[in-house]
Image (cartoon, grey):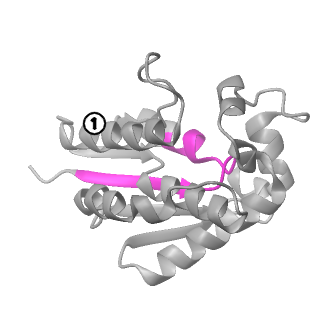
Amino acid sequence: MKKKLVVLEGISGVGKTTIAKALSDHFAWNYIPEIIDHNKSKKFTEEYFTIVEEIKIGMFTNSALINNVMDRSPISIMAHNYVRKMMDIKNLYDDLLGWFKREIDPIKKKHFVYLRTSDYDNCIKRKWGVNLENFPKEYEKIPGMKIWAQKESLIAFQEYYDNFFSQNQFNVLTLSADEKKLS
């Protein structure tokens, strides 16, 4: 059995989860979610995020279904640490390069859908609320996590994805995810 995987990538609030769930529901695909809490005993750190990506790769590898859809991949951890590095915030970017190569290899020849937008403010509102009222309290414990909710860092995230997908050999479909086109 040759399994298929579609991975949705893009900045926070662009619509990855909405689209992944819709694909899963409509076509009865295996949905591999963005994992926020897998082990309450593990400290909420950068290591936590790499572990959840390993869990997600395992969910695909162990899936009994042919069709699978994943909300984010290890690319997002690299983007996160790259943006932190660009903003001179403590990061693990250089340390994660070997880990990333190992984790991305099993899904490298799969299909990626990269959602782009020019409406960063709408992404922030959609993901975190008007005044960031939905921003997770746990994120406050990690220095630099607010970059997921700041316009200037979302622009840098998107630049990372643009560069990454233009320089790597992935099967990528880039879609405009502006609000008008998603409805």
In the visual, does 177 lie left or right of 34?
Answer: right
Q: How many marks?
A: 1
Q: Position of residue 34 (x, y in %)?
A: 49, 37
Number of residues whose C-alpha sits closer than 10 Å to that of mark 1, classed few (under 14), some (14–19) or many (20 or more):
some
Where residue 51 sits, quadrant-wise, is: top left
> Is 11 part of what is drawn in magenta?
yes
What residue span does the magenta drawing correspond to?
Answer: 4-20
Q: Residue at x 47, y 40 (%)?
A: 49
Q: Is residue 27 above or below residue 177?
A: above
Name, please, the residue furthest toward the left.
Answer: 1
Tell me the residue that label 1 is attached to: 59
Which residue is found at the position 60% from the left and 61% from the top?
A: 115
- In this rendering, would 9 be left or right of 87? left
Q: Which residue sits furthest bottom?
A: 167
Residue 148 vs 158, above or below: the answer is: above
| Amino acid marked by disc 1 | Met
* Secondary element at tag 1: helix
95 versus 63 height, above or below: below
